[in-house]
Amino acid sequence: MELSDSIVRNSYIYRFVSLNCCVNLNKFASVPLSGSSCAAVSLTRSKRRSRRRELPPSMETPPDGYRRNVGICLVNPSKKIFTASRINIPYTWQMPQGGAGEGEDLRNAAMRELREETGVTSAEFVAEAPYWLTYDFPSQARERINRRWGTNYKGQAQKWFLFKFTGKEEEINLLGDGSETPEFKDWAWLLPERVLELAVGSKKPVYEQVMKVFGSYLQAHADEGNCAGQNETKAKVHVKSTPV
């Protein structure tokens, strides 16, 4: 099924898409998490046959030439992950993320970006990835991105945080807190495998590592999701309108 149709731009029609499917999370091996430190952890390179660029080794500090960035893995009580589709890139879904200022506390930056992009403030810190992950901008987009920012970055170096959503879904507002231009048009709570399927190619290796880092938490109570007809996917679409 198509997850994204045309958006009504002048009235900001946003949709909540709920895709419920059973999945085995045992494939997501976990690594030790960090409360605040940046201890380096060796990553096992994937041996899958793929044309995607292999993920660079983990690192204690972001490398030169990469923009400091934070990523937010927000999960609900069912251990599903908040994922949203971008306005400017059709059929592209991702977890919230954004730049961190020089000297800005990274956890605070993650909370700020979550609020700016989704309106969410009811989130409880769970864990921090113990290392930075990087991805390169696609070659066809790098010049355009750097021209807009007035920079010369190769890509982004991300520090990922896991938060638990503790509020009500009415709190989620893709207009954000009004401080930034909206980036998303649709949102959904998705299982990890679905998040990986919908992610843009340049971010898939990073997302795979994020799932491994937070795998022990995502796997908790995973058996509760087991049900008859594991290959069946049920979808419900709820249209929500946010006046401008």
Image: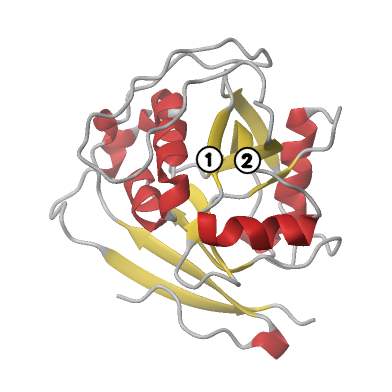
- Give the percent coordinates (x, y) of residue 172: 66, 60
State left or right for residue 119 relative to residue 185. Answer: right
Q: Is 206 drawn above or below residue 21 in the view shown?
A: above
What amino acid is labelled 2 in the image? Answer: Gln
Q: Nearer the viewer, residue 74 or 50?
A: 50
Residue at (38%, 72%) from the top-left corner? Answer: 236
Using the rendered view, name the quadrant where residue 220 is placed: top left
- Give the percent coordinates (x, y) of residue 44: 34, 20
Residue on which the image places disc 1: 135
Residue on which the image places disc 2: 156
Using the rendered view, name the quadrant where residue 243 is placed: bottom right
What amino acid is labelled 1 in the image? Answer: Tyr
Q: Nearer the viewer, residue 144 or 96?
A: 144
Q: Residues within 10 Å of mark 2 (few under 14, many from 20)?
A: many
Check the picture and name the quadrant holding the C terminus.
bottom right
Figure label count: 2
Asked if disc 1 and disc 2 are in contact, CB closer than 8 Å, the reply is yes
Q: Secondary structure at mark 2?
A: strand
Q: Is residue 172 visible?
A: no
User: CA–CA distance between discs 1 and 2?
Assistant: 6 Å
Using the rendered view, name the quadrant where residue 226 is placed: top left
Q: Which mark is residue 86?
A: none
